Amino acid sequence: MSNTTPDGFTGSVIYWDRDLTLVPKKASGARRVGLRLARRLRTPRGHALGHPNDGTDISDALESTLDQRGAQNLRAAITAECLKDVSVKTCFTTVTLSNGGTVNTIAVRAFGDFGATTVTIQKLSDGTFATQIT
């Protein structure tokens, strides 16, 4: 059974063990909020069931080339999306650019009654995405 928040993103998470065995676990507190934010940032707008205005898939933003204004716009859009989560009171987004302006990493630091959580997403050289939640 999952705990659904008003924004439609759930707190239940399925982890994969190294041998690809499903291990359902329940997340809580800052980890739960971090997982919801990570899901929110990887879900295209309108694909969260019953919530057409939620979600923003940052996949295309990672590895794209931006100038400073583009990076500011991306930070603002990600911050606005994360602030839609009912648990998030304050949020700061960092977009790390290479010397050529390519987006390498996107990190979100969110604060609320749950404490604080950081979600870092980066595209790996093989085209997959790495997400770290602390």
Image: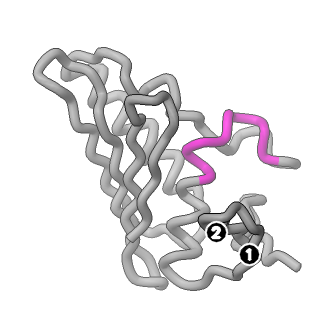
Residue 43 covered by magenta stretch: yes
Q: Nearer the viewer, residue 82 or 97?
A: 97
Contact flag, marks 1 and 2 (Cβ < 8 Å): yes
Element assignment for label 1:
strand
Which span is picked out in magenta? 39-48
Q: Nearer the viewer, residue 114 or 126?
A: 126
What label sits on residue 109 in the rendered view? none
Element assignment for label 2:
loop
Amino acid type, mark 1? Val
From the viewer's perspective, tell me whether residue 84 is left or right of residue 108: right
Residue at x 60%, y 84% (from the top left corner): 28
Q: Nearer the viewer, residue 5 or 104?
A: 104
What label sits on residue 23 in the rendered view? 1
Q: Position of residue 42 (x, y in %)?
A: 59, 42
Q: Quadrant of residue 70?
A: top left
Label 1 vs 2, first from the N-terminus: 2
Task: State the residue position of label 2.
Answer: 17
From the viewer's perspective, tell me whether residue 16 is left or right of residue 122: right
Q: Position of residue 26 (x, y in %)?
A: 70, 82
How packed mark 1 is, by other alpha carbons closer than 10 Å (few <14, some 14-19, many 20 or more), is: few
Q: Which secondary structure type mostly characterizes the magenta part of the structure?
A: loop
Q: Measured along the vertical axis of the image, is residue 128 above or below residue 133?
A: above
Residue 19 covered by magenta stretch: no
Q: Where's the N terminus, which quadrant?
A: bottom right
Q: Where's the C terminus, which quadrant?
A: bottom left
User: In this rendering, which labeled residue sits more in front, label 1 or label 2?
Assistant: 2
Q: Position of residue 120 (x, y in %)?
A: 37, 53
